[in-house]
Amino acid sequence: MDEPSISHTTSSETDTSARIDDLHPIELAAHSLLTGPLDTLSDNFESLNQSQIILLTRLRVIENRLKTFKQLVESNDISEKQLLAQFNKIKDLTDRINRCLKLLDKIDSRISRLDD
């Protein structure tokens, strides 16, 4: 008893084999040689696209922070004259403190001489 062979060929396998039969051997060779690099290239482009999206998002965040900083700086209405006046006050106070420290040193030395 010979059992009939049952073929389990699906329609997609038939379609693929029909397409392969229609191709010239050189086309098949070119396809097999280029399929791997083309898939890799496609993956690289997808990765590049994702990287660009991430970079654009980060650039927008940085741009928003810079705009906020610029608005803060522009809203800070201290003129150059006012700034120079404050620096001069600080310098004058520093000079006064230094003079007071020198005076204290003199007083301290006099007290130490009196104690001797």
Image (cartoon, helix red, strand yellow):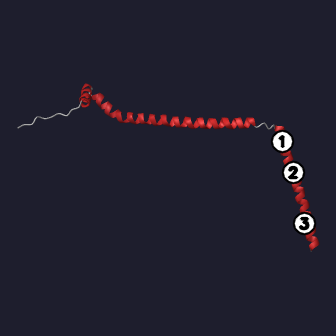
- CA gap, disc 3 and disc 2: 22 Å
The reply, left or right, for residue 91 in relation to residue 39 is right
Q: Earlier in the sequence, mark 3 or mark 1?
A: 1
Q: Residue at x 19, y 34 (%)?
A: 8
Q: Residue at x 71, y 37 (%)?
A: 72
Mark 2: which amino acid?
A: Leu
Q: Earlier in the sequence, mark 3 or mark 2?
A: 2
Q: Residues within 10 Å of mark 2 (few under 14, many from 20)?
A: few
The reply, left or right, for residue 4 in relation to residue 29 is left
* Residue under numbered circle 2: 93
Q: Residues within 10 Å of mark 3 (few under 14, many from 20)?
A: few
Coordinates of residue 106 in the picture (x, y in percent): 92, 63
Q: Residue furthest left?
A: 1
Q: Residue at x 60, y 37 (%)?
A: 61
Q: Residue at x 92, y 73 (%)?
A: 115
The reply, left or right, for residue 39 in relation to residue 70 is left
Mark 1: which amino acid?
A: Leu
Q: Marks 3 and 2: CB-CB under 8 Å?
A: no
Coordinates of residue 59 in the picture (x, y in percent): 59, 36
Give whichever of 8, 100 is nearer the camera. 8
Residue at disc 2, secondary structure: helix
The reply, left or right, for residue 77 in relation to residue 57 is right
Of the 4 image quadrants, the one containing the C terminus is bottom right
Coordinates of residue 57 in the picture (x, y in percent): 56, 36
Mark 3: which amino acid?
A: Asp
Coordinates of residue 107 in the picture (x, y in percent): 92, 64
* Residue under numbered circle 1: 84
Give whichever of 59, 75 is nearer the camera. 75
- CA gap, disc 1 and disc 2: 14 Å
Q: Is residue 48 above or below residue 91?
A: above
